[in-house]
Image (spheres, rainbow, N blue to C red):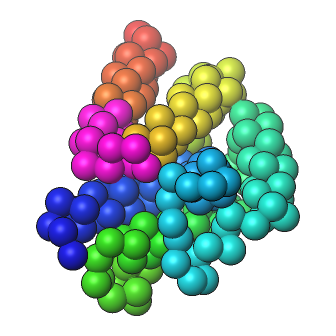
Amino acid sequence: MDVISGLGGIAAGFGLSGSAGLNAYIPLLIVALAARFPTANPILELGEPYNTLANSWVIGVLAVLLLIEMFVDKIPAVDTINDVIQTVIRPTAGAILFAANAGIVTDLSPVLAIIIGLILAGGVHAVKGVVRPAVTATTAGTGNWLVSLIEDVIAFVVSVLSILIPILSAIVFAILLYFFLSYLYRRNKRHNYVYRG
């Protein structure tokens, strides 16, 4: 095993699992498409049983679920119900993504990979679950669609970078998450100051 490719696989796992904590279906669909196309020489080669993601039916279902998720996650109150449902789905997606990508180029134990992915995606989802109600309360729900859109863009960018430039993706994810949380903190602080004044 080449050390650089091993680190790349682990970094890809971190980036994709973190993205799954924001939106489970974006990184799953991107990995599925990368494992399927181009047909002659796919970008990713997933081992068993993860290569099932490249199945046409799985790709179709993921695309439909992504459209549903992107729609319901932008509606106040409905997004909270969606987040409760996603409490199981996002960490599971993170576990699958970390195990599928770390296992490509490393000898990392599948159980350990699943646990790391589960904890990472679950942690990002937990932060999202705490931040979202605060956004709803401070903006009367008008900021939900924007925050959801930002989350989707972050999940997309980090997922693509995770596949193309794995180590960079982990760094970009950390930077984007930092700026996103800083923005929400400043906005919430400013709103509380204005509300008290």
x and y percentages locating residue 121 in the rendered image: 46, 62
Magenta span: chief secondary structure:
helix
Give 44 or 127, whichever is nearer the viewer. Answer: 44
Q: Position of residue 98 (x, y in %)?
A: 43, 68
Q: Which residues are magenta?
A: 162-178
Q: Which residue is at 75% across, 67% downward?
A: 55
Using the rendered image of the protein, determine whether residue 25 is visible from the camera's viewpoint. no
Q: Nearer the viewer, residue 190 or 15?
A: 15
Q: How many marks?
A: 0
Residue occupying image coordinates x 84% and y 64%: 57
Task: Check if residue 177 falls in the magenta segment.
Answer: yes
Q: How far across and how far down the image is residue 163, in percent?
A: 43, 49
Assign the C terminus to one quadrant of the image. top left
**Residue 40, placed above or below residue 99:** above
Tell me the quarter of the picture where residue 150 sits: top right
Residue 147 placed where, x, y %? Answer: 56, 29
Judge left or right: residue 168 versus residue 62. Answer: left
- The residue lying at 56 percent from left, 55 percent from top is 41
In the rendered structure, the answer to whether residue 78 lies left or right of residue 25 reads right
Q: Residue furthest left?
A: 3
As displayed, is residue 58 above or below residue 95? above
Q: Where is residue 3, by image quadrant?
A: bottom left
Was residue 71 drawn as part of the magenta stretch in this picture? Answer: no
Q: Is residue 181 visible?
A: yes
Q: In the image, is residue 31 above or below residue 99? A: above
Relative vertical location of residue 12 with respect to residue 52 in this rendering, above or below: above
Q: Looking at the figure, which quarter contains the N terminus?
A: bottom left
What residue is drawn where x is 37% and y is 24%?
A: 183
> Is residue 194 found left or right of 137 in the rendered image?
left
Q: Residue furthest front?
A: 40
